[in-house]
Image (tube, rainbow, N blue to C red):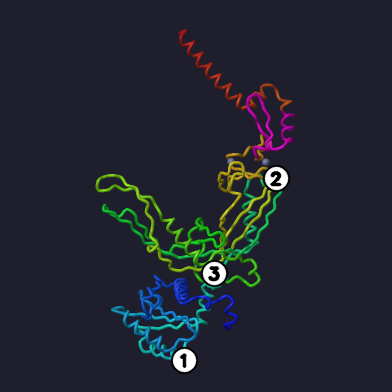
Amino acid sequence: MDKAKRGRYFDLDALNGYEFEEFVARLLRMMGYEDVQVTQRTGDKGKDIIAYSNHGKPFKYKVIVECKHTKSVGRPVIQKLQGALLHELGDDPYIKGIIVTSGKFTKEAIEYTEEINKKHGSWMEIELIDGRKLYELCKKHGIKIVSGNIQVVSDITFKHLPKEEVKKRTIGELETIKGIEKTTYQVKTWKSYYPYYCVRYSVHSQVCTKVGCIYEVNVDDELLFVDGVTGKVLDNLPHGFFKFSPENLTKIPEDEKNLIRPFNFSVDELEQKVIDSIINKYTKEVVYRGKNNVEYRKVCSPKKKDILIKESCPIYLPQYTNSIKIQETNYNQSIVANERDIFKISDDLAFCKVCGETIPIGERYVCPVCGKVLGPCHVIFDYLDGTPVCPDHAVPRKLYLQTIYFASKENLEKFNNMWATMSEWERITTDTTLMKVLIVIGFVMLLYLIKILGGLF
Ligand SMILES: [Zn+2]
Ligand SMILES: [Zn+2]
């Protein structure tokens, strides 16, 4: 792609030298370089960024990066970096240098670099990244620059179940709700590619006092997804639901690009949210005893420097939205899917419509009149046929003491006809509340009788 075409959403010219360094540092982090630090700019010693990597080697090595936000980079820049590498090598077995430019390398610069790599490649290598390669890397890692801001772009998603399958499973689960067969319902399913900023991170943090360490966090390679629309962290996703191995990833097909929802936040904003949420996640109140045997409370959290962002990338999660209408009541479900399973991020059907309590699958009922989903907390059963019904639509009928309910006027009428033909004894035994009271009275009288008889003999 030529520069004019690239320019529209890869506007490197909008960055100043310092911003260019920050931008390169960000890209390196996304590429998996660790501990990427932009160095303090005290004179140009031929190193703008220091990072670490273990890519291609069985050990971790230092990486020195020089950024040149210029049209052309010649041989002297390579020589200067070579000097810096020699200086930084120390006792290490290997060191790598990278020169990143928004422009091009001269022929001499390229030849000189090839020479170095050929001669010293076992312990020192230099990689050249020019404007074109920079563009390719940005595309691969999903970032773009729009009027000086680094924005997120991506067309990567996880392989996932098709819409028909998700809809089928939705209906399958809907049919486990007791009473659903007496209702009419509709299910509409939409697919979207929903933006998330995914981060792989480690936290190693300790808080120590005079009496020892009272707080410690050691986690490695945790994944975190930040919702690119709302900025909220997706924290209920089952561990390992999405796996970042190449065989699980795919590109969003051209004819589904219209289903992509755009990111609302820049990379900077998203990274800030990531850091905040990681700190929040591992913040704990610790109670400990001091040397003076006094109990102390201390809120401990990891510091920003304890958090290592190992890799970050924007990604679109295959997300389905179900709009379900049962009788007159509407429900929404948000579902993410991988190749085998679906997971509900949110599900209106999981809550009792009367009180809002969470109801597990298998204990859900639905009112055939209004379509409200009910938990065991609020379901009422028809006296005759056991149809579940909501408190608003249950038709009550008082016996002697007990009140019984019906799901319909017809069932009430049916019962009234039966009641009319019953003997008095049948009616009394039908009222279980009355029967209980009678049994208690009978029992008390029996005890009383025994007492009287006991007194006689
Ligand atoms: Zn309830
Ligand atoms: Zn109802």
Check if mark 3's residue and mark 1's residue have beta carbons within 8 Å.
Answer: no
Q: What is the quadrant of residue 204 in the picture?
A: bottom left
Q: Is residue 95 visible?
A: yes
Disc 1 beta carbon < 8 A from ligand 1? no
Drawn side of residue 77 relative to residue 340, left or right? left
Q: Nearer the viewer, residue 19 or 354?
A: 19
Q: Which residue is mark 2?
A: 182
Circle 2 SS class: helix
Q: Which residues are magenta?
A: 390-418
Helix, strand or loop at mark 1: helix
How dense is the environment of label 2, judged by Cα within 10 Å: few (below 14), some, or many (20 and up)? some
Q: Residue 107: which disc?
A: 1
Can residue 52 be seen at all in this image of the molecule? no
Amino acid type shown at disc 3? Val
Q: Are marks 2 and 1 in contact (CB under 8 Å)?
A: no
Q: Amino acid at mark 1?
A: Lys
Quarter holding the C terminus? top left
Left or right: where 243 falls relative to 161 = left
Please state which of the two labelled residues, at mark 2 or mark 1, is closer to the viewer. 1
Any magenta on residue 400?
yes
Foreground residue among 11 and 411: 11
Q: In the image, is residue 45 above or below residue 29?
A: below
| Relative image position of residue 238 (x, y in whole percent) | 50, 57
Q: Nearer the N terminus, badge 3 or badge 2?
A: 3
Which of pointers 3 and 1 lies earlier in the amino acid sequence?
1
| Mark number, residue 152 | 3
- Give the SS element for disc 3: strand
